[in-house]
Image (cartoon, helix red, strand yellow):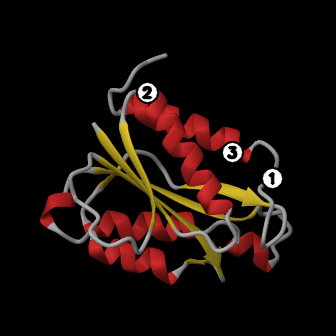
Amino acid sequence: MRALVAYYSKFGNGKLIAEAIGKGLQETGLEVTVTEVGTKGISDDYDLVVLSSPTRAGRMMGPAKRFIGELKTAAWKGKSFIAVGTGFKPKGTGGKFDEFGARSADKSYEALAKAGPKPLMEAQKFYVEEMKGPLLEGEEERALELGRTAGRALGGATS
């Protein structure tokens, strides 16, 4: 099985998350390509697409939206996807960051589902300390485990 992990990363946090997810998928025996969105000539010969986007004003960023637009082909219909977003962790205060925190994951999920692939799991959110990072402690490890879990769900190795 083949997985495409595509990311857009403004400050490098999304790239770290994408690479960790890719590593976890590889550990289960999947053939994985990790690439930045906007790379020309991306094939549709994958069983899974993972898309990671930072959150800006509660939305996914433009390069991720354009990537999803490129997926709108019959070849992606019925294949699996995971939507990933990075951003602030909600503090539960009702402030604007609670509303916008890592919400790109939800927006990517909605757009990917509309484009044709089917969700492998709910939207996945990873958190940063400040706008430019770094990631909160443990987030890369959580992304690695997410990759392992997704790989096993797709029939990869169980170890």
Q: Earlier in the sequence, mark 2 or mark 1?
A: 2
Q: Do the residues labelled 1 and 3 touch (CB within 8 Å)?
A: no
Q: Measured from the top left, where is residue 126 in percent x and y?
A: 67, 55
Q: In this view, does 25 lie above or below 132?
A: above
Task: For label 3, count other residues whose C-alpha is less than 10 Å away and answer few (under 14), some (14-19) or many (20+).
Answer: many
The CA span between labels 1 and 3 is: 9 Å
Which amino acid, by three-letter code, is at mark 3? Glu
The CA span between labels 3 and 2 is: 17 Å
Q: Are marks 2 and 1 in contact (CB under 8 Å)?
A: no
Q: Which mark is residue 140?
A: 3
Looking at the image, is mark 2 or mark 1 nearer the viewer?
2
Q: Measured from the top left, where is residue 127 in percent x and y?
A: 73, 58
Q: Residue 28 carries which label?
A: 2
Q: Is residue 89 above or below residue 37?
A: above
Viewer-nearest residue: 125 or 20: 20
User: Under tag 2, what secondary structure?
Assistant: loop
Residue position marked by numbered label 1 in the rendering: 136
